[in-house]
Amino acid sequence: MTEHHGLAKNTLGGFESIVMGIAGTAPAFSVAVTTATIVSTVGVLSVGSVLYCGLIMFGITLAFIHLSKITPNAGAAYAWVGHVFGASWGFFAGWGLLIASVFFMVSATIPAASSTLLLIAPQYVENTEAIAGVAAIWLSLITLIVTRGIKHSSYVQITFTIFETAILIALIVGGLIHYWDAPAHLPSIIWFSPFSFSPQLFATGALTAIFFFWGWDVTMNLSEESKSNASQASGAASTG
C-alpha cells in the first residue's frame, strides 16, 4: 500500500487563502517594527514611500497572479524563475526566500516573547534568558501547528488574524480620537510628491516600506492547496 505524501489539494477556500495572505504580511509586527524605522529614516515622506512601494508591489502581484493562473505551483518564485531563467536562478530565488523566512521567524519570536512576558511576568521582560526561552516555546508551537497540516494552520491563522486586526483597529480609532485636535503633523501634499524625495531618500524609504508588504506572496505558495487553485490563489493575492 502506497502512502500519499503530496500536498492537501482543494483544502483552502477563498476566505482562508485571503486570511493567510494577510497574516503573511504580519500587520502587527510591521506596525511595531517597520513604522518606527521608516519614520526615523524618511520622516513625513513615509506616507509617500509606502504608497510608491505599494505601486511597485502591485505590479509584482499582477505578474504573480498571471503566473499562478498559467502554472499553479507551491514553489511560486522558485519554480517560475527556474522555468524562465534556468535552474541556477531558480535555486537562488528559492534559497533567498528560505533564508529570509528563517531570519524573520527568529526575529519575530523576540517581540512575541517580550510581549508575552510583559503580560504574564513583567519582572522578566529585561531577562535575556527568559526572552530566549519564551521565544523558543513560541517557535516550537508554530512548528507543531505547521506540521499538523494546512487546514489546522489556517484555523490558527484565522483566529490570530481576527484578534490581531481587532486590536489594531482599536488602537487606530483610539489614536484618532485622542490626537484628532493635536496632530503631530498636518496632512500635506508634500508627503506624496515624488519631487520631495532625493534619490537616496527614495531608495531608503522604498527599501524600508517593502517590509509592510513582505509575505503577501504566501498565497501563491498555497495555490496547489486552494480550491479552484488558480482563481482562489490569484484572488487572495490581489486582496491581500
Image: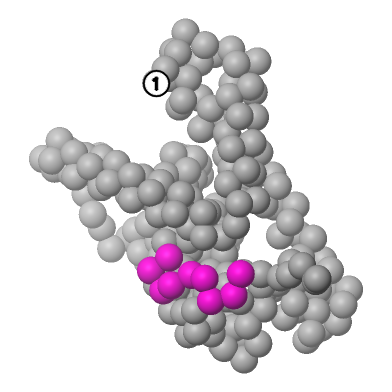
x and y percent of residue 129 in the render? 65, 15
- Could you say which is closer to the camera, residue 6 or residue 25? 6
Give the number of marks: 1
- Could you say which is closer to the camera, residue 195 or residue 114? 114
Is residue 160 in sight in this rendering?
yes
x and y percent of residue 77 in the render? 69, 73
Q: Where, quadrant-wise, is the C terminus in this rendering?
A: bottom left
Q: Where, quadrant-wise, is the N terminus in this rendering?
A: bottom right
What is the span of residues highlighted in magenta in the rendered image? 8-16
Q: Residue furthest front?
A: 1
**Disc 1: which residue:** 119
Residue displayed at 25% across by 58% down: 188
Question: Is 15 within the magenta?
Answer: yes
Residue displayed at 51% across by 32% down: 112
Q: Is residue 224 left or right of residue 27?
A: right
Q: Which residue lies furthest to the top in this view?
A: 123
Q: How is the model colour-coded?
A: one colour
- Could you say which is closer to the camera, residue 91 or residue 220? 220
- Could you say which is closer to the camera, residue 225 or residue 18? 225
The residue type indicated by label 1 comes to Leu
Q: In this view, does 72 lie to the left or right of 201?
A: right
Q: Residue furthest bottom?
A: 70
Residue displayed at 67% across by 78% down: 73
Q: Residue furthest right?
A: 88
Q: Is mark 1 on a helix, strand or loop?
A: helix
7 lies above or below 112:
below
